C-alpha cells in the first residue's frame, strides 16, 4: 500500500524481477512446472533445447533474446527437420512464459520453418544387408535397438525404452500411459499395444542377457538418430532415420500381401471407431504369423540369402 501510495507498481516490479533470469533457468522451470505434467514428449524436446539452444542462449536473459538470435540458431542446425523441431521446442518455452506473465513476447513467433519434403524412405532389398552389417559399428546396444525397430516395426522411442517386465510369453505389451517410475514414456497415441516378438527379435534380447525387470538394453537408449546418420555416411547412401526402419517393416507387411489393415494393427496406428474398443486382443494368432513371416523375410534379405525355387509366398 505504501509503494502504491508512492506511485510504484509493486506487482509489475516483481514480474520484471522474475524475467531477469537466464534462459537456462526459464527452460528448467518450464520443464519442471509444466512440460513434465502436460507434454508427453518433454524429454525429446528437452534434449533438443539442451543440445542446440542452451550452449548459445543459456546465459542470456530470456527477455533479451531476439528473432535474430532465433534465426542464427536455426542456421546452425544442418538438418532442416531437426531445426524445425528445435524451433518448436524453444517456442513452447516462450509461449508458456507469456501465459505465466514472465515475458511479453515470443521471439520464435513468425520465424519461418524450413521447407521439408514428406519422407517416404524405405530401405531397398539391396540396401538391407549393407545396413544390417553397418549397424554393428554403433555398438551392441544401439545396433540391437536399430535391428529391433526393423524386425518389429515399432516406434523408435518405444523400442528405446523397451522393458523386460513388459514381455510376457513372447508378447511385448506396451502400456499406453506413461509410467514415470519405470522410465516408460507411454505409446505415442496413448493406446496400449501388444506385439509379437519374432524369433529373430527374441534372439537379440537373449544376446543382451536382459534381466527379468528393467530396460532390455540395460538403459534407455539414446543417440539412435546420430547412429543412423553415421551408418548412412559410412555407406555413402541417402539419409535414413530410425523411423525409416519402421516404415520399411510396414512396407514389408503390405508387400507380402497382408494388407494395410494388418500393418496399421501391428504398428499401433489408431483406427478409431467402436470396433477398436471391443477388439483389443483380436487377431493375435494372425498377428503372430505375420510378424514371424515379415521378420523371416527381412532376415533373408539382411543375410543375403536366396529364396528356394520351390517356395512361394502365400497371401
Image: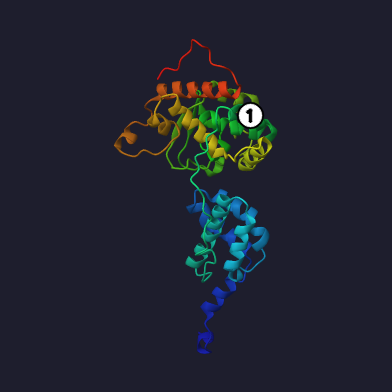
Q: Is residue 83 left or right of residue 40?
A: right
Residue drawn at point x = 47 percent, y = 37 percent: 175
Give the image quarter of residue 261. top left
Q: Residue furthest left?
A: 274
Camera sees residue 138: yes
Q: Quadrant of the C terminus?
A: top left
Residue drawn at point x = 66 percent, y = 31 percent: 134
Give the camera-side residue of 244 and 96.
244
Camera sees residue 154: no
272 above or below 251? below
From the image, tell me which residue sits under label 1. 130
Give the image quarter of residue 287. top left
Mark 1 secondary-structure assignment: helix
Q: Tell me residue 133's x, y (percent).
A: 65, 28
Q: Is residue 255 left or right of residue 3?
A: left
181 above or below 10? above
Give the image quarter of residue 300. top right
267 above or below 59? above
Amino acid at each position: 500500500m505504501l509503494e502504491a501510495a508512492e506511485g510504484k507498481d509493486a506487482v509489475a516490479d516483481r514480474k520484471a524481477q522474475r524475467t531477469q533470469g537466464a534462459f537456462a533457468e526459464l527452460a528448467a522451470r518450464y520443464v519442471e512446472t509444466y512440460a513434465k505434467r502436460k507434454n508427453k514428449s518433454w524429454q525429446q524436446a528437452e534434449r533438443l533445447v539442451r543440445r542446440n539452444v542452451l550452449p548459445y542462449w543459456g546465459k542470456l536473459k530470456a527477455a533479451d533474446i531476439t528473432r535474430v538470435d532465433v534465426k542464427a540458431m536455426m542456421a546452425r542446425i544442418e538438418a532442416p527437420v531437426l531445426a524445425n523441431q528445435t524451433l518448436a521446442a524453444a517456442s513452447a518455452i516462450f509461449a508458456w512464459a507469456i501465459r505465466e506473465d514472465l515475458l511479453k513476447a515470443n521471439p520464435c513467433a513468425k520465424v519461418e520453418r524450413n521447407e521439408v519434403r514428406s519422407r517416404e524412405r524405405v530401405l531397398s532389398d539391396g540396401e538391407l544387408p549393407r545396413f544390417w552389417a553397418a549397424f554393428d559399428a554403433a555398438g551392441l546396444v544401439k545396433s540391437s535397438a536399430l535391428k529391433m525397430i526393423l524386425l518389429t516395426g515399432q516406434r523408435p522411442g518405444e523400442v528405446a525404452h523397451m522393458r523386460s517386465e513388459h514381455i510376457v510369453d513372447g508378447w511385448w505389451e506396451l502400456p499406453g500411459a506413461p509410467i514415470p517410475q519405470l522410465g516408460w514414456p507411454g505409446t505415442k497415441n496413448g493406446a496400449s499395444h501388444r506385439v509379437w516378438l519374432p524369433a529373430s527379435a527374441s534372439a537379440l534380447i537373449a544376446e543382451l542377457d536382459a534381466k527379468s525387470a528393467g530396460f532390455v538394453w540395460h538403459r534407455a537408449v539414446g543417440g539412435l538418430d546420430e547412429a543412423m546418420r553415421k551408418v548412412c555416411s559410412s555407406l555413402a547412401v541417402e539419409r535414413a532415420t530410425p523411423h525409416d526402419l519402421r516404415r520399411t517393416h510396414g512396407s514389408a507387411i503390405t508387400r507380402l500381401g497382408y494388407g494395410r489393415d494388418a500393418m496399421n494393427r501391428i504398428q499401433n496406428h489408431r483406427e478409431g471407431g467402436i470396433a477398436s474398443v471391443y477388439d483389443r486382443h483380436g487377431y493375435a494368432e494372425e498377428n503372430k504369423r505375420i510378424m514371424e513371416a515379415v521378420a523371416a523375410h527381412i532376415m533373408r534379405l539382411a543375410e543375403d540369402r536366396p529364396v528356394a525355387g520351390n517356395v512361394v509366398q502365400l497371401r
